Image (cartoon, grey):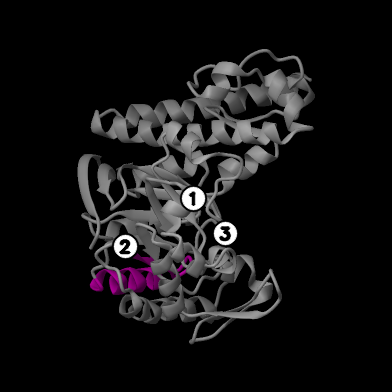
Amino acid sequence: MALRFEVLGRFNRARAARLTLPHFVSQTPLFMPVGTQGTIKGLTTNQLEEIGCQIILGNTYHLALRPTSELIDELGGLHKFMNWPRAMLTDSGGFQMVSLLHLADITEKGVTFQSPVDGKPMLLTPEESIQIQNRIGADIIMALDDVVKTTITGPRIEEAMYRTLRWIDRCIAAHKKPNEQNLFGIVQGGLDPVLRDICVRGLVERNLPGYAIGGLAGGEDKDSFWRVVAQCTALLPEDKPRYVMGVGYPLDIVVCSALGADLYDCVYPTRTARFGTALVPEGVLKLKHKAMAEDTRPIDPTCSCMVCKNYTRAYIHCLVTKDAMGSQLLSYHNLHYMLQLSRDLHSSIIEERFPDFVRGFLQKMVNAECECSRKERDS
Protein backbone atom coordinates (compact mmCIF):
# COMPACT_ATOMS: atom_id res chain seq x y z
CA MET A 1 0.00 0.00 0.00
CA ALA A 2 1.42 3.37 -1.06
CA LEU A 3 -0.90 5.73 0.79
CA ARG A 4 -1.74 6.91 4.29
CA PHE A 5 -5.20 8.17 5.18
CA GLU A 6 -5.61 10.07 8.45
CA VAL A 7 -8.96 11.45 9.59
CA LEU A 8 -8.29 14.84 11.19
CA GLY A 9 -11.82 15.90 12.07
CA ARG A 10 -15.45 14.79 11.90
CA PHE A 11 -19.00 16.02 12.06
CA ASN A 12 -21.37 13.06 12.19
CA ARG A 13 -20.49 11.17 8.99
CA ALA A 14 -18.57 14.02 7.34
CA ARG A 15 -14.81 13.80 7.74
CA ALA A 16 -11.77 15.93 6.92
CA ALA A 17 -8.63 13.93 6.27
CA ARG A 18 -5.03 14.00 5.13
CA LEU A 19 -4.32 11.70 2.17
CA THR A 20 -0.60 11.04 1.71
CA LEU A 21 0.28 9.74 -1.75
CA PRO A 22 3.69 9.13 -3.37
CA HIS A 23 3.68 12.50 -5.16
CA PHE A 24 1.66 14.75 -2.84
CA VAL A 25 -0.10 15.16 0.49
CA SER A 26 -3.75 16.09 -0.15
CA GLN A 27 -6.59 17.30 2.04
CA THR A 28 -10.08 15.90 1.75
CA PRO A 29 -12.89 16.41 0.89
CA LEU A 30 -11.32 17.04 -2.49
CA PHE A 31 -12.48 17.69 -6.04
CA MET A 32 -10.13 16.33 -8.73
CA PRO A 33 -10.16 17.97 -12.21
CA VAL A 34 -10.23 15.67 -15.23
CA GLY A 35 -7.36 15.84 -17.71
CA THR A 36 -8.45 13.17 -20.17
CA GLN A 37 -5.28 13.06 -22.29
CA GLY A 38 -2.78 14.44 -19.82
CA THR A 39 -4.04 18.01 -19.92
CA ILE A 40 -6.78 20.17 -18.43
CA LYS A 41 -8.00 21.97 -21.55
CA GLY A 42 -6.74 25.54 -21.72
CA LEU A 43 -4.70 25.50 -18.48
CA THR A 44 -1.01 24.94 -17.79
CA THR A 45 0.24 22.77 -14.93
CA ASN A 46 1.62 25.93 -13.28
CA GLN A 47 -1.87 27.44 -13.30
CA LEU A 48 -3.28 24.24 -11.78
CA GLU A 49 -0.76 24.48 -8.95
CA GLU A 50 -1.60 28.18 -8.56
CA ILE A 51 -5.29 27.45 -7.88
CA GLY A 52 -4.47 24.66 -5.43
CA CYS A 53 -5.09 21.56 -7.53
CA GLN A 54 -3.85 18.50 -5.63
CA ILE A 55 -4.82 15.47 -7.76
CA ILE A 56 -5.74 15.37 -11.45
CA LEU A 57 -7.21 12.53 -13.50
CA GLY A 58 -5.98 10.89 -16.66
CA ASN A 59 -8.02 8.57 -18.85
CA THR A 60 -6.51 5.13 -19.42
CA TYR A 61 -8.52 4.41 -22.57
CA HIS A 62 -7.58 7.66 -24.32
CA LEU A 63 -3.94 7.67 -23.18
CA ALA A 64 -3.52 4.07 -24.36
CA LEU A 65 -4.73 5.08 -27.81
CA ARG A 66 -2.68 8.26 -28.00
CA PRO A 67 0.18 8.82 -27.28
CA THR A 68 0.24 5.16 -25.96
CA SER A 69 1.23 3.98 -22.49
CA GLU A 70 4.47 2.53 -23.86
CA LEU A 71 5.64 5.96 -25.00
CA ILE A 72 4.58 7.56 -21.70
CA ASP A 73 6.52 4.89 -19.78
CA GLU A 74 9.56 5.35 -22.03
CA LEU A 75 9.51 9.09 -21.33
CA GLY A 76 9.41 8.64 -17.56
CA GLY A 77 5.71 8.30 -16.74
CA LEU A 78 2.77 10.68 -17.01
CA HIS A 79 3.96 12.98 -14.21
CA LYS A 80 7.16 13.76 -16.08
CA PHE A 81 5.50 13.68 -19.51
CA MET A 82 3.02 16.44 -18.59
CA ASN A 83 5.25 18.22 -16.05
CA TRP A 84 2.92 17.63 -13.10
CA PRO A 85 4.68 17.24 -9.72
CA ARG A 86 1.58 16.49 -7.63
CA ALA A 87 -0.67 13.44 -7.41
CA MET A 88 -2.52 11.73 -10.25
CA LEU A 89 -5.31 9.20 -10.63
CA THR A 90 -6.04 7.17 -13.75
CA ASP A 91 -9.39 5.56 -14.42
CA SER A 92 -9.55 2.01 -15.75
CA GLY A 93 -11.24 2.64 -19.09
CA GLY A 94 -14.44 1.04 -17.75
CA PHE A 95 -16.52 4.20 -18.05
CA GLN A 96 -16.11 4.02 -21.82
CA MET A 97 -18.41 0.97 -21.68
CA VAL A 98 -21.20 3.45 -21.06
CA SER A 99 -19.99 6.54 -22.92
CA LEU A 100 -18.87 4.62 -26.02
CA LEU A 101 -21.29 1.69 -25.80
CA HIS A 102 -21.94 1.75 -29.54
CA LEU A 103 -18.20 1.00 -29.98
CA ALA A 104 -17.92 -1.64 -27.22
CA ASP A 105 -18.61 -5.35 -26.80
CA ILE A 106 -18.47 -6.62 -23.18
CA THR A 107 -17.65 -10.26 -22.33
CA GLU A 108 -16.13 -12.08 -19.36
CA LYS A 109 -12.73 -11.72 -21.00
CA GLY A 110 -12.92 -7.93 -21.15
CA VAL A 111 -14.17 -5.09 -23.32
CA THR A 112 -13.56 -4.88 -27.04
CA PHE A 113 -13.64 -1.28 -28.27
CA GLN A 114 -13.62 0.00 -31.79
CA SER A 115 -10.81 2.52 -31.79
CA PRO A 116 -12.06 6.04 -32.62
CA VAL A 117 -8.57 6.72 -34.01
CA ASP A 118 -8.28 4.02 -36.69
CA GLY A 119 -11.43 1.88 -36.29
CA LYS A 120 -9.46 -1.23 -35.29
CA PRO A 121 -10.74 -3.43 -32.42
CA MET A 122 -8.97 -2.94 -29.09
CA LEU A 123 -9.42 -5.52 -26.30
CA LEU A 124 -9.20 -4.09 -22.79
CA THR A 125 -9.01 -6.85 -20.18
CA PRO A 126 -8.62 -6.29 -16.42
CA GLU A 127 -4.99 -7.35 -16.78
CA GLU A 128 -4.32 -5.01 -19.71
CA SER A 129 -5.99 -2.08 -17.93
CA ILE A 130 -3.70 -2.53 -14.93
CA GLN A 131 -0.61 -3.01 -17.11
CA ILE A 132 -1.39 0.23 -18.96
CA GLN A 133 -1.91 2.07 -15.65
CA ASN A 134 1.33 0.61 -14.24
CA ARG A 135 3.15 2.08 -17.23
CA ILE A 136 1.41 5.47 -16.92
CA GLY A 137 2.45 5.66 -13.26
CA ALA A 138 -0.40 7.46 -11.45
CA ASP A 139 -0.55 7.47 -7.63
CA ILE A 140 -4.05 5.93 -7.68
CA ILE A 141 -5.17 3.43 -10.30
CA MET A 142 -8.68 2.06 -10.75
CA ALA A 143 -9.78 -1.54 -11.24
CA LEU A 144 -11.58 -2.34 -14.48
CA ASP A 145 -15.26 -2.74 -13.65
CA ASP A 146 -18.36 -3.62 -15.65
CA VAL A 147 -20.22 -0.31 -15.83
CA VAL A 148 -23.91 0.00 -16.64
CA LYS A 149 -26.18 3.02 -16.46
CA THR A 150 -28.29 3.29 -13.31
CA THR A 151 -31.35 3.78 -15.48
CA ILE A 152 -31.00 0.15 -16.70
CA THR A 153 -32.90 -2.48 -14.71
CA GLY A 154 -33.08 -6.27 -14.70
CA PRO A 155 -30.44 -9.04 -14.77
CA ARG A 156 -27.78 -6.91 -16.52
CA ILE A 157 -27.21 -4.97 -13.25
CA GLU A 158 -26.61 -8.16 -11.28
CA GLU A 159 -24.36 -9.59 -14.01
CA ALA A 160 -22.23 -6.42 -14.01
CA MET A 161 -21.89 -6.39 -10.22
CA TYR A 162 -20.70 -10.00 -9.97
CA ARG A 163 -18.38 -9.53 -12.95
CA THR A 164 -16.88 -6.49 -11.23
CA LEU A 165 -16.08 -8.68 -8.22
CA ARG A 166 -14.52 -11.35 -10.43
CA TRP A 167 -12.48 -8.78 -12.30
CA ILE A 168 -11.08 -7.18 -9.11
CA ASP A 169 -9.18 -10.40 -8.39
CA ARG A 170 -7.69 -10.35 -11.88
CA CYS A 171 -6.71 -6.69 -11.36
CA ILE A 172 -5.04 -7.46 -8.02
CA ALA A 173 -3.09 -10.35 -9.57
CA ALA A 174 -1.95 -8.16 -12.50
CA HIS A 175 -0.86 -5.20 -10.34
CA LYS A 176 2.94 -5.15 -10.34
CA LYS A 177 3.58 -1.91 -8.39
CA PRO A 178 1.55 -2.12 -5.14
CA ASN A 179 4.27 -0.24 -3.26
CA GLU A 180 4.17 2.68 -5.72
CA GLN A 181 0.56 2.78 -6.94
CA ASN A 182 -2.70 2.32 -5.05
CA LEU A 183 -5.37 0.09 -6.62
CA PHE A 184 -8.93 1.16 -5.78
CA GLY A 185 -11.91 -1.14 -6.25
CA ILE A 186 -15.24 0.18 -7.56
CA VAL A 187 -18.61 -0.58 -5.98
CA GLN A 188 -21.28 -1.43 -8.57
CA GLY A 189 -24.86 -2.67 -8.24
CA GLY A 190 -27.02 0.05 -9.78
CA LEU A 191 -29.78 1.35 -7.51
CA ASP A 192 -30.34 -2.07 -5.93
CA PRO A 193 -29.37 -1.92 -2.22
CA VAL A 194 -28.91 -5.71 -2.01
CA LEU A 195 -26.47 -5.77 -4.93
CA ARG A 196 -24.61 -2.73 -3.62
CA ASP A 197 -24.30 -4.43 -0.24
CA ILE A 198 -22.88 -7.63 -1.79
CA CYS A 199 -20.39 -5.62 -3.86
CA VAL A 200 -19.19 -3.45 -0.96
CA ARG A 201 -18.66 -6.45 1.30
CA GLY A 202 -16.87 -8.37 -1.44
CA LEU A 203 -14.47 -5.51 -2.14
CA VAL A 204 -13.80 -4.81 1.55
CA GLU A 205 -12.77 -8.47 1.96
CA ARG A 206 -9.95 -7.77 -0.53
CA ASN A 207 -8.50 -5.09 1.80
CA LEU A 208 -7.73 -2.55 -0.92
CA PRO A 209 -6.00 0.82 -0.33
CA GLY A 210 -9.23 2.69 -1.20
CA TYR A 211 -12.71 2.32 -2.64
CA ALA A 212 -14.81 4.10 -5.23
CA ILE A 213 -18.58 4.27 -5.61
CA GLY A 214 -19.27 3.89 -9.32
CA GLY A 215 -22.17 3.68 -11.72
CA LEU A 216 -23.86 6.89 -10.54
CA ALA A 217 -24.49 10.35 -12.03
CA GLY A 218 -25.98 8.62 -15.06
CA GLY A 219 -29.52 9.96 -15.08
CA GLU A 220 -30.95 8.67 -11.80
CA ASP A 221 -32.90 11.04 -9.53
CA LYS A 222 -31.06 12.81 -6.72
CA ASP A 223 -32.77 10.89 -3.91
CA SER A 224 -31.70 7.55 -5.41
CA PHE A 225 -28.17 8.83 -6.02
CA TRP A 226 -27.71 10.14 -2.48
CA ARG A 227 -29.28 6.99 -0.99
CA VAL A 228 -26.70 4.78 -2.74
CA VAL A 229 -23.84 7.02 -1.58
CA ALA A 230 -25.18 6.95 1.99
CA GLN A 231 -25.46 3.15 1.94
CA CYS A 232 -21.96 2.60 0.53
CA THR A 233 -20.13 5.09 2.76
CA ALA A 234 -21.79 3.51 5.83
CA LEU A 235 -20.36 0.10 4.88
CA LEU A 236 -16.90 1.10 3.63
CA PRO A 237 -13.92 1.11 6.05
CA GLU A 238 -13.38 4.19 8.22
CA ASP A 239 -9.64 4.20 7.59
CA LYS A 240 -9.70 4.17 3.79
CA PRO A 241 -10.51 6.93 1.27
CA ARG A 242 -13.94 6.88 -0.42
CA TYR A 243 -14.25 8.22 -3.96
CA VAL A 244 -17.59 9.03 -5.63
CA MET A 245 -16.88 8.83 -9.34
CA GLY A 246 -18.14 11.30 -11.93
CA VAL A 247 -19.60 13.80 -9.46
CA GLY A 248 -18.94 17.50 -10.10
CA TYR A 249 -22.00 19.55 -9.18
CA PRO A 250 -21.17 21.63 -6.08
CA LEU A 251 -24.42 20.64 -4.32
CA ASP A 252 -23.68 16.94 -4.84
CA ILE A 253 -20.17 17.36 -3.42
CA VAL A 254 -21.49 19.09 -0.30
CA VAL A 255 -24.18 16.43 0.24
CA CYS A 256 -21.82 13.49 -0.45
CA SER A 257 -19.23 14.98 1.92
CA ALA A 258 -21.91 15.15 4.61
CA LEU A 259 -22.54 11.45 3.92
CA GLY A 260 -18.89 10.56 4.47
CA ALA A 261 -17.32 10.63 0.99
CA ASP A 262 -13.86 12.10 0.38
CA LEU A 263 -12.95 12.36 -3.32
CA TYR A 264 -14.80 13.50 -6.45
CA ASP A 265 -14.10 14.08 -10.14
CA CYS A 266 -16.00 15.41 -13.14
CA VAL A 267 -15.54 17.28 -16.41
CA TYR A 268 -18.46 19.55 -15.49
CA PRO A 269 -16.53 22.66 -14.29
CA THR A 270 -14.39 22.87 -17.44
CA ARG A 271 -17.03 21.64 -19.88
CA THR A 272 -19.57 24.19 -18.65
CA ALA A 273 -16.86 26.86 -18.91
CA ARG A 274 -16.50 26.11 -22.62
CA PHE A 275 -20.21 26.90 -22.97
CA GLY A 276 -19.74 30.29 -21.31
CA THR A 277 -21.03 29.41 -17.84
CA ALA A 278 -19.34 30.31 -14.55
CA LEU A 279 -19.83 28.66 -11.16
CA VAL A 280 -20.76 31.11 -8.41
CA PRO A 281 -22.07 30.73 -4.84
CA GLU A 282 -25.62 31.40 -6.07
CA GLY A 283 -25.41 28.62 -8.68
CA VAL A 284 -24.33 29.49 -12.22
CA LEU A 285 -23.76 32.69 -14.18
CA LYS A 286 -24.25 32.56 -17.96
CA LEU A 287 -21.75 34.95 -19.46
CA LYS A 288 -23.19 34.68 -22.97
CA HIS A 289 -26.39 36.45 -21.91
CA LYS A 290 -26.86 39.97 -23.28
CA ALA A 291 -27.25 41.27 -19.73
CA MET A 292 -23.51 40.63 -19.22
CA ALA A 293 -22.44 42.87 -22.11
CA GLU A 294 -22.11 46.03 -19.97
CA ASP A 295 -21.68 44.47 -16.52
CA THR A 296 -18.45 45.81 -15.01
CA ARG A 297 -18.51 43.53 -11.94
CA PRO A 298 -16.23 40.50 -11.61
CA ILE A 299 -17.77 37.06 -12.13
CA ASP A 300 -17.94 36.64 -8.34
CA PRO A 301 -17.10 39.61 -6.08
CA THR A 302 -16.25 37.18 -3.24
CA CYS A 303 -13.77 35.14 -5.32
CA SER A 304 -10.01 35.67 -4.96
CA CYS A 305 -8.99 34.01 -8.24
CA MET A 306 -6.91 35.78 -10.87
CA VAL A 307 -9.89 36.05 -13.24
CA CYS A 308 -12.18 37.75 -10.73
CA LYS A 309 -9.40 40.11 -9.65
CA ASN A 310 -8.58 41.26 -13.18
CA TYR A 311 -11.53 40.89 -15.56
CA THR A 312 -15.14 42.05 -15.76
CA ARG A 313 -18.21 40.11 -16.79
CA ALA A 314 -18.48 42.41 -19.81
CA TYR A 315 -14.96 41.51 -20.99
CA ILE A 316 -15.51 37.78 -20.58
CA HIS A 317 -18.92 38.09 -22.30
CA CYS A 318 -17.11 39.58 -25.28
CA LEU A 319 -14.61 36.71 -25.28
CA VAL A 320 -16.88 33.71 -24.75
CA THR A 321 -18.85 34.48 -27.87
CA LYS A 322 -15.75 34.82 -30.09
CA ASP A 323 -12.46 33.76 -28.53
CA ALA A 324 -10.94 30.63 -26.90
CA MET A 325 -9.49 32.88 -24.20
CA GLY A 326 -12.99 33.15 -22.74
CA SER A 327 -13.30 29.45 -22.04
CA GLN A 328 -9.77 29.40 -20.63
CA LEU A 329 -10.54 32.17 -18.15
CA LEU A 330 -13.82 30.52 -17.15
CA SER A 331 -12.11 27.13 -16.76
CA TYR A 332 -9.56 28.75 -14.45
CA HIS A 333 -12.30 30.40 -12.39
CA ASN A 334 -14.54 27.32 -12.25
CA LEU A 335 -11.74 25.04 -11.09
CA HIS A 336 -10.68 27.64 -8.52
CA TYR A 337 -14.28 27.67 -7.29
CA MET A 338 -14.36 23.86 -6.95
CA LEU A 339 -11.01 23.71 -5.19
CA GLN A 340 -11.99 26.54 -2.85
CA LEU A 341 -15.19 24.64 -2.07
CA SER A 342 -13.01 21.63 -1.21
CA ARG A 343 -10.85 23.74 1.10
CA ASP A 344 -13.92 25.28 2.75
CA LEU A 345 -15.44 21.85 3.38
CA HIS A 346 -12.18 20.62 4.92
CA SER A 347 -11.69 23.64 7.17
CA SER A 348 -15.34 23.79 8.27
CA ILE A 349 -15.16 20.19 9.49
CA ILE A 350 -11.80 20.73 11.22
CA GLU A 351 -13.07 23.93 12.89
CA GLU A 352 -16.37 22.29 13.94
CA ARG A 353 -18.57 24.66 11.93
CA PHE A 354 -19.66 22.27 9.19
CA PRO A 355 -23.45 22.70 9.81
CA ASP A 356 -23.11 26.49 9.55
CA PHE A 357 -21.12 26.16 6.34
CA VAL A 358 -23.73 23.86 4.76
CA ARG A 359 -26.58 26.17 5.83
CA GLY A 360 -24.80 29.18 4.32
CA PHE A 361 -24.00 27.30 1.12
CA LEU A 362 -27.63 26.21 0.64
CA GLN A 363 -29.07 29.59 1.67
CA LYS A 364 -27.19 31.41 -1.10
CA MET A 365 -28.57 29.02 -3.70
CA VAL A 366 -32.13 29.20 -2.33
CA ASN A 367 -32.05 33.02 -2.17
CA ALA A 368 -30.82 33.18 -5.77
CA GLU A 369 -33.62 30.87 -6.93
CA CYS A 370 -36.22 32.94 -5.08
CA GLU A 371 -34.89 36.15 -6.63
CA CYS A 372 -34.95 34.55 -10.09
CA SER A 373 -38.56 33.43 -9.60
CA ARG A 374 -39.56 36.91 -8.42
CA LYS A 375 -38.04 38.53 -11.52
CA GLU A 376 -39.86 36.06 -13.77
CA ARG A 377 -43.18 36.90 -12.09
CA ASP A 378 -42.57 40.65 -12.38
CA SER A 379 -41.52 40.55 -16.03
Q: Position of residue 1 (x, y in %)?
A: 23, 63
User: From mark 3 to mark 2, how far is it between C-alphas?
Assistant: 28 Å
Q: Quadrant of residue 187?
A: bottom left
How many other residues sit within 10 Å of disc 2, few (<14), some (14-19) or many (≥20)?
many
- Tell me what residue is drawn at x 44 percent, y 65 percent: 73
Name the quadrant of the C terminus: top right
> Residue 35: horizontal and vertical position, in percent?
53, 51
Residue 255: x %, y % from top left: 42, 43
Left or right position of 89 against 180 = right
Three-letter code for the amino acid on which mark 1 is drawn: Met
Nearer-the-camera pick, 160 or 329: 329
For residue 218, the mark is 3
Name the residue beneath numbered marker 1.
Answer: 82
Q: CA distance from mark 3 to mark 1?
A: 30 Å
Upstream in the sequence, badge 3 or badge 2?
Answer: 2
Q: Is residue 97 magenta?
A: no
The amino acid type found where label 2 is placed reads Gln
Amino acid type, mark 3: Gly
Please tell me whether residue 21 is drawn above or below residue 185 in the rendered image.
above
- Residue bounds of the magenta highlight: 182-206
x and y, in percent, of residue 289 in the image: 76, 27
- How far apart marks 1 and 2 lie (CA) works out to 18 Å
Mark 2 — residue?
Answer: 181
User: Hey, which quadrant is residue 288 in on the image?
Assistant: top right
